[in-house]
Amino acid sequence: MTQAIAPRAAATTTGGVAFRVRVLLLLLLAVIGAVLAGAAPASAHAALTGSDPQQGAVVSRAPTQVSLTFSEKVAMSDGSVRVLDPKGKRVDTGKATDLGGTTYGVKLHSGLPDGTFTVTYQVVSADSHPVSGAFTFSVGAPSQTSVALSDPAVGGGVVGALYGVGRYVSYAGFILLVGGAAFVLACWQRGAGVRPVQRLVVSGWLALTGATLALLLLRGSYVGSGKVGDIFDLTLLGQVLQTKAGAALVSRLLLLAAGALFIAVLFGAYARRDEADATDEGDASGRSDGSDKGGVDVDAAKRDLTFGLAIGGAVVAAGLAASWAMAEHASTGIQAGLAMPVDVLHLLAVAVWLGGLSTLLVALFRAPAETQIDAVAVRRFSRLAFASVTVLAATGIYQSWRQVGSWSALTGTWYGQLLLIKIGLVAVLVGIAWISRRWTAQLSEAPQARAMATAGAKAGTTAGATALAELRTKQPTKVPANSRDSSSEGSDSRDANSTGSNSGDSRRAAQLARQQAAVATARQKRLRDADPARAGLRRSVLAEAGVAVVLLAVTTVLTSTEPGRTEEAAQQATSSSSQRSGPLSLKLPFDTGGQDGKGTAEVTLDPARVGGNEMHVFVKRPNGKPFDVPEVKVAFTLAAKKIGPLPVTPDRIATGHWSAIGVQIPMAGDWEIAVTVRTSDIDQTTVTKNAKIG
């Protein structure tokens, strides 16, 4: 009956751990599935904020080039911008040029027909994400077109889904690698010799390395055709290596090579030294003469090795974090010089917190009984986690302001809504961590239980050894006298039987020793788990890990989503252009007060954008006939920017018609247009009207 207790207890414990692991795995798969199912096919981080001709515009003459203005710098290649005529034939020269700032253009062939033209673009933003889209404009008048504007495939499809999974795995690997190593060095140095902890950190390194290689192969197809067959195209791989994103991935692989050396030392020489120190401490406690030769030198050597590993690990971890900061959100936009080091600190804080949490979870559930984590290590991690959360909050507030910029973007954009979800998850994590901190404060070493467990283990081992010794020294059964004169064959038979009996006794002794050890281990686990604080800590840490899985998924989607500040600016630009397409036309009734002083001044501005414009003024009588007045003047004022009035004196072209070429509008905005009409030597008036230009 006693022999069956240990296997049953071990099976129960193992089954409970396996069940919890399966729950976390299913939660992880569910989150990844939800993320991939709800992800947009293309994540545009550089928004198209303007074009010439504008979207939906109708121009009188065919332009010589098409220009596109983005919210940030983009990378272009030949064929990035294409212009198609109504029949679907390309009418651009194929080579895109940088026109300065964030504006790019492509030349058009001459002699273009009237009708609707389609402009498609596919570029890579400065933060390494693909951007694509299309719009139309018309020459003369709109017409039917054979070009179908379908959803862009760039960044989506199977390749996009694989790229998203690779990003998630790379973040998870970074967290396990950096956080696990930091937990061992800063909180629980004995953990360097614990196999489950070693497997966790090594798994993080393998996951990050494999995901980085996969992202490097997927990158060319991800930002290009989106075809699975292009994943192994070496030409595309060569092009990727010349980009900022490719350089970041290669740098990450080089740093991971240094990380492999760090892991080898941490779980090799460092773990052996820690075990040797523990043995020396045990020997020293058993010596009665109090000798402590070389103890100071051993402690100093261990401190030096710990310090060296900490410095080397910090450099490798910071470099790995910088490989994200130098190629993604932090590398572009406002205050990029400050945003990149802040992003590095943010990533390191996340890794130390969540990676340490994962290591603590493994230590609580999977560490052997003889190397069970102690209360001192748990309290150290509690302080380290508190410091990490403080850094995380400070850097997160700055990043949120930089990427969102306004309350409307926080609530009205997908990026802002994801950010609110992330803040909520962090708040839940902090709440659960507070509960864990309370359990940690109550956690005791239970010295009596540990002493009993140790005594039980020693007793079990001693009993097994004693049984083995007794069985080995047991005398064989005496042989009867009448058999002493048997032949040599009988003697050999007795020797063989004696040998077989001894072999069977040895096997039974070994089996008895294993059973005794299993009983002692089960007793030790029961005594260890009798501490209610340790059981409560296990439950709270497991809950933290579950929330952390969801938090990591939301963070991965957040890093591949267009920032709220950029999205809001693009929405405003689109709204402004949709309110007015084509040339601006205003009608301003006037009355100078004198005889025959009433009429209407119609002002047209083409194309009504920043830069040079063509202006026409038509003056008509109330009956609609042209009105030949002595003088007409126009002035433009942008009060919001304190620009103007900018006077324009048009030339008379014909009766009731004045014109001016090259009217410069320096900035987009809500302009006040003032028209002064003089109908006689003393009768004149000025009428105004506001209009959006640019």
Image (spheres, helix red, strand yellow):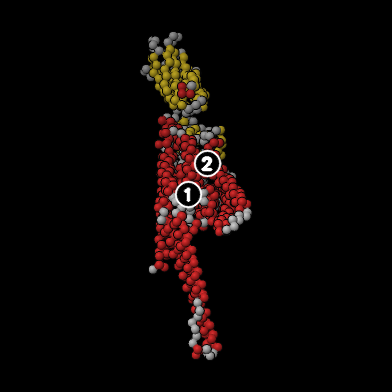
Q: Which residue is mark 2?
A: 345
Nearer-N-terminus badge (2/1): 2
Q: Residue furthest left?
A: 623
Asked if residue 38 lies left or right of residue 256, the reply is left
Q: Is residue 26 visible?
A: no
> Tag 1: residue type?
Val
Q: Residue furthest front?
A: 289
State the separation of the CA atoms marked 2 and 1: 23 Å
Position in image of residue 431 (x %, y %): 41, 44
Q: Nearer the viewer, residue 608 or 369?
A: 369
Residue at 42% across / 65% down in the picture? 7
Residue 579 sits in quarter: top left
> Tag 2: residue type?
Leu
Q: Nearer the viewer, residue 464 or 64?
A: 464
Element at badge 2? Answer: helix
Q: Which mark is residue 378?
A: 1
